Amino acid sequence: MCDFNEKTVVVTGAGSGIGRATAIAFGKAGANVVVADINEENAAKTAAEIGSRALAFKVDVGDEAQCQAMIAATVNKFGRLDVLFNNAGIGGQRARIADMPTEEWLKVININLNSLFYCTKAAIPEMKKVGGGVIINTASVDGLMGMATISHYVSAKHAVIGLSKTCALEYAADNIRCLAICPGFVETPMVSSGFTKQEAELIKMMTPLGRAADPSEIANVVVFLASEKASFMTGSFLQIDGGVLAGVNFPS
Ligand SMILES: NC(=O)c1ccc[n+]([C@@H]2O[C@H](COP(=O)([O-])OP(=O)(O)OC[C@H]3O[C@@H](n4cnc5c(N)ncnc54)[C@H](O)[C@@H]3O)[C@@H](O)[C@H]2O)c1
């Protein structure tokens, strides 16, 4: 079992899906959890499930000052920061590149990439104060391959892997580990609202395990990566994708 007693964890996008499941998993592992989301009501619901060791915090991670305020509130409430799970993200409007509105491109890049820079930049000095920490960034299988109609999302997720590697290099000497996760298809509101039923079926068919993940199946890996059990892991990315990137399969 991974023990996070006396540790403080910030989870962004914790009001729904992967973030919600991970915040709850960290809570079960004994952590103080900052449940951060732009949706205040959902953040409060997740925090209520965790109990008294949780703090719901409203944040728009696309705004640097709000990310700084989130880290300051964390330290103010719990006295330290040990783990940052940069997970909040959006799917964005879908279109091929020539039809993609530039504002939409900028919005997705801001929320899915710039936000990780803002939160990480604010978190590192606090992690240094307590002798180290772990930063886990949610990329995607779309950080390792292309997908038509979501050029902004794919570009941001590729960059998240680059940011994670660079962060790992720059702060290894400070005992700060940084990793990226690359989930495949996960059953969350983001995918149910972002893909048609037909597209969702196609993605499931392309997944060797033949189904989407439950968010808890991503949360379990994040908690492991953040724990001492993964102490020699940094600068890497982990596919949690039901085998989708393993290659091409044929029905037997
Ligand atoms: N669901 C999948 O199949 C899948 C696959 C790979 C990667 N991901 C990534 O996982 C992460 C979580 O996605 P999910 O599927 O759980 O989606 P979700 O929509 O269930 O949850 C995302 C959460 O982020 C919050 N959020 C959105 N914009 C925000 C902002 N500006 N500031 C703060 N919070 C904000 C939302 O309110 C929501 O609670 C995202 O980064 C997504 O790109 C998802």
Image: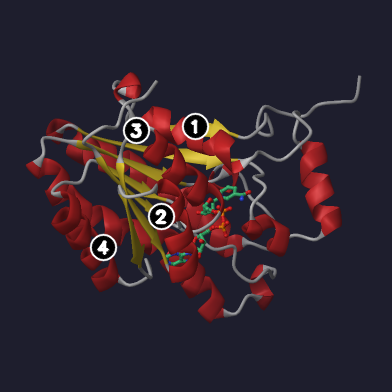
Up-down: is 79 above or below 230? below
Mark 4, other Cα within 10 Å: few <14 / some 14–19 / many ≥20: many
| Labels 3 and 1: the sequence-earlier one | 1
Q: Amino acid at mark 1?
A: Asn
Q: Secondary structure at mark 3?
A: helix
Find residue 57 and report its image quarter. bottom left
- Look at discs 2 and 1 and give the one toward the viewer: 2
Viewer-closest of 161 and 41? 41
Q: Which mark is residue 47?
A: 2
**How far apart in space, not on screen, are marks 4 and 1 (Cα)?**
24 Å
Q: Position of residue 67 (x, y in %)?
A: 28, 65
Viewer-closest of 251 and 126? 126
| Labels 4 and 2: the sequence-earlier one | 2
Mark 1, other Cα within 10 Å: few <14 / some 14–19 / many ≥20: some
| Disc 1 residue: CB within 8 Å of ligand 1 | no
Find disc 3 in the rendering and name its residue: 226
Find disc 1 in the rendering and name its residue: 220
Viewer-closest of 119 and 1? 1
**How far apart in space, not on screen, are marks 2 and 3 (Cα)?**
20 Å
Q: Amino acid at mark 4?
A: Met
Q: Farthest left residue? A: 129
Q: Is residue 21 left or right of residue 129?
A: right
Mark 3, other Cα within 10 Å: few <14 / some 14–19 / many ≥20: many
Question: Which quarter of the rendering shows the N terminus?
Answer: top left
Q: Residue at x 54, y 56 (%)?
A: 16
